[in-house]
Image (tube, grey):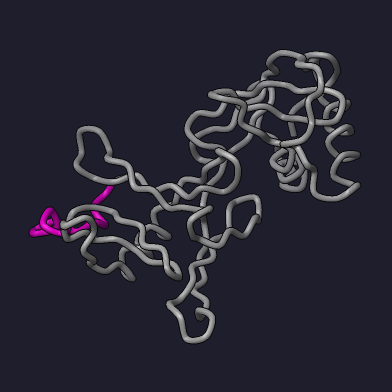
């Protein structure tokens, strides 16, 4: 675990304690809190989902989950929020990874629903509020898939899970164009135009 050090208005341990206290009272309503802004602290979430403090990885998964529970996005800035302070952190890409999927039967014989687990053990049901998006990978022709977790916080879909999504993909007509994508319940998430798949396997997308 990272060593204790100065972090804005207090030490790393003080911040950890404030986060634990906030979580002890139930799921933190971080979207309702408006504490003083204490500036940025030397905490970073790397593209592979690893959390760092002062350059050292935070090795305790339980503590990472606590910090993740009070993470919020304010515009383009990521902040950790407790009832008494708000501290900015650095996020290299997006804060979470989407690492596991189950496909549940839909209600009353409806289409199957996708439920996805993040690396901090949040389960998200894909749909209108928790969308999948597939961004072009610059210079490669591939795709970068992401899942919306909550209030502007996204998870990058890891390669094995992306493969699973491709395996259950299908083609549908969207606004007059045939699209390849994946469905969850009544919601369809387009990946790419179907006519671009000739001679190209979507699994070739790098991540």
Left or right relative to 112: residue 176: left
Residue closest to the far bottom: 109
Query: Across the whole image, how many numbered discs are drawn on residues?
Result: 0
| Place of residue 44 in the rendered image (x, y in percent of width and height, measured from the top left) | 61, 27
Residue drawn at (34%, 47%), measured in percent from left and top? 134
Residue drawn at (81%, 23%), measured in percent from left and top? 35
Say if 44 sits above or below 64 in the image: above
Residue 125, by quadrant, is: bottom right
Residue drawn at (38%, 66%), measured in percent from left and top? 183
| Place of residue 169 in the rendered image (x, y in percent of width and height, measured from the top left) | 30, 67
Left or right relative to 200: residue 164: right
Of residue 22 and residue 99, the one placed in the foreground of this image is 22
Of residue 105 and residue 201, the one placed in the foreground of this image is 105
Residue drawn at (53%, 53%), measured in percent from left and top? 129
Say if 118 sits above or below 170 in the image: above
Left or right relative to 106: residue 72: right
Residue closest to the far front: 175
In reply to whether residue 202 is colored magenta, the answer given is yes
Residue 70, by quadrant, is: top right
Say if 159 sits above or below 106 in the image: above
Of residue 49 and residue 27, the one placed in the foreground of this image is 27
Of residue 177 and residue 198, the one placed in the foreground of this image is 177
Left or right relative to 26: residue 175: left
Say if 202 sits above or below 113 in the image: above
Magenta stretch: give its range: 194-205
- Quadrant where the N terminus sits is top right
| Place of residue 146 in the rendered image (x, y in percent of width and height, measured from the top left) | 43, 47
Residue 75, by quadrant, is: top right
- Quadrant where the C terminus sits is top left
In reply to whether residue 35 is colored magenta, the answer given is no
């Amino acid at each position: 675990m990272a060593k204790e050090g100065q972090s804005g208005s207090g030490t790393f341990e003080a911040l950890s304690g404030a986060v634990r206290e906030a979580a002890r009272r139930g799921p933190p309503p971080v979207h309702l809190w408006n504490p003083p802004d204490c500036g940025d602290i030397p905490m970073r979430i790397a593209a592979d989902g690893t959390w760092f403090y002062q350059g050292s990885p935070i090795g305790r998964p339980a503590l990472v989950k606590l910090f993740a529970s009070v993470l919020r996005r304010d515009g383009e800035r990521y902040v950790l929020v407790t009832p008494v302070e708000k501290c900015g952190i650095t996020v290299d890409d997006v804060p979470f990874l989407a690492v596991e999927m189950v496909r549940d039967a839909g209600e009353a014989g409806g289409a199957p629903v996708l439920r996805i687990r993040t690396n901090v053990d949040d389960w998200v049901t894909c749909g209108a509020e928790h969308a999948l998006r597939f961004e072009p990978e610059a210079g490669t022709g591939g795709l970068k898939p992401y899942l919306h977790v909550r209030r502007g916080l996204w998870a990058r879909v890891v390669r094995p899970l992306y493969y699973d999504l491709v395996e259950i993909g299908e083609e549908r007509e969207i606004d007059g164009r045939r699209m390849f994508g994946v469905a969850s319940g009544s919601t369809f998430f387009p990946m790419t135009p179907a006519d671009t798949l000739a001679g190209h396997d979507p699994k070739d997308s790098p991540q």
